């Protein structure tokens, strides 16, 4: 075997290997599906994820009101479109391994969230870095969802 042949084979096989490795996280990513509620705040926010790993419908509710609703095509890596507080919004979301990363821009302010499911699938850690730059972490628990997608 020549070095040229090995290089050509590596170029052909590498994309297949990278594509296959991406599929390894599908089960981990699908663990995000469902409803999640914070257990430490007096006015909990309920996050509902549906359709992962390829499509995403995301609803965040507080006091029974939808404060954020998004639809994303996770396979196409496009911006998510939806409503935040009743206003149109575009938010970027992508996977970094099993972790879902969200970047939300309002004017010149940037908020980053990392949604990290536990291995058991019964809890979700949300790391939020708001515009002031002071990171916060919240632990959410899986909850049941009623027909209107708010926690029971």
Image (spheres, helix red, strand yellow):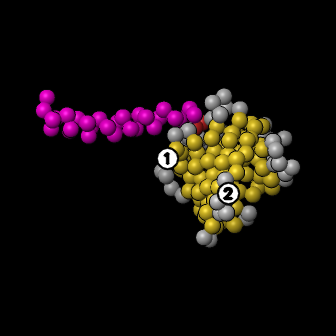
* Quadrant in which residue 49 is drawn: top right
Q: Main secondary structure of the magenta part?
A: helix
Mark 2 vs mark 1: which is more N-terminal? 1
Q: Position of residue 147 (x, y in %)?
A: 78, 43
Q: Residue at x 15, y 38 (%)?
A: 4
Is residue 88 left or right of 23 when viewed as pictured? right
Q: SS for tag 2? A: loop
The quarter of the rendered structure image containing the N terminus is top left
Magenta region: which residues?
1-28
Which of the numbered marks, if any, corresponds to residue 75? 1
Q: Residues within 10 Å of mark 2 (few under 14, many from 20)?
A: few
* Residue that protrudes farthest toward the left in the picture: 2
Q: SS for tag 1? A: loop
Q: Position of residue 110 (x, y in %)?
A: 61, 63
Is residue 2 left or right of 102 when viewed as pictured? left
Q: Nearer the viewer, residue 34 or 110?
A: 110
Q: Are marks 2 and 1 in contact (CB under 8 Å)?
A: no
Residue of label 2: 134
Q: Residue at x 56, y 38 (%)?
A: 98
Is residue 79 shown to the viewer in this render? yes
Q: Nearer the viewer, residue 125 or 122?
A: 125
* Quadrant in which residue 10 is drawn: top left
Q: Does the segment drawn in magenta span residue 116?
A: no
Q: Position of residue 67 (x, y in %)?
A: 75, 58
């Amino acid at each position: 075997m020549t070095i040229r042949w090995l290089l050509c084979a590596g170029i052909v096989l590498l994309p297949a290997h990278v594509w296959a490795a991406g599929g390894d996280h599908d089960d981990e990513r699908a663990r995000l599906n469902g409803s999640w509620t914070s257990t430490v705040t007096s006015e909990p926010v309920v996050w509902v994820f549906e359709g992962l790993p390829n499509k995403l419908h995301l609803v965040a509710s507080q006091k029974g009101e939808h404060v954020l609703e998004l639809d994303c095509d996770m396979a196409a890596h496009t911006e998510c479109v939806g409503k935040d507080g009743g206003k149109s919004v575009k938010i970027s979301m992508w996977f970094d391994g099993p972790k879902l990363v969200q970047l939300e821009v309002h004017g010149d302010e940037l908020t980053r969230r990392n949604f990290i499911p536990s291995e058991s699938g019964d809890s979700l850690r949300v790391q939020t870095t708001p515009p002031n730059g002071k990171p916060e972490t919240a632990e959410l628990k899986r909850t049941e969802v009623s027909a209107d997608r708010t926690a029971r």
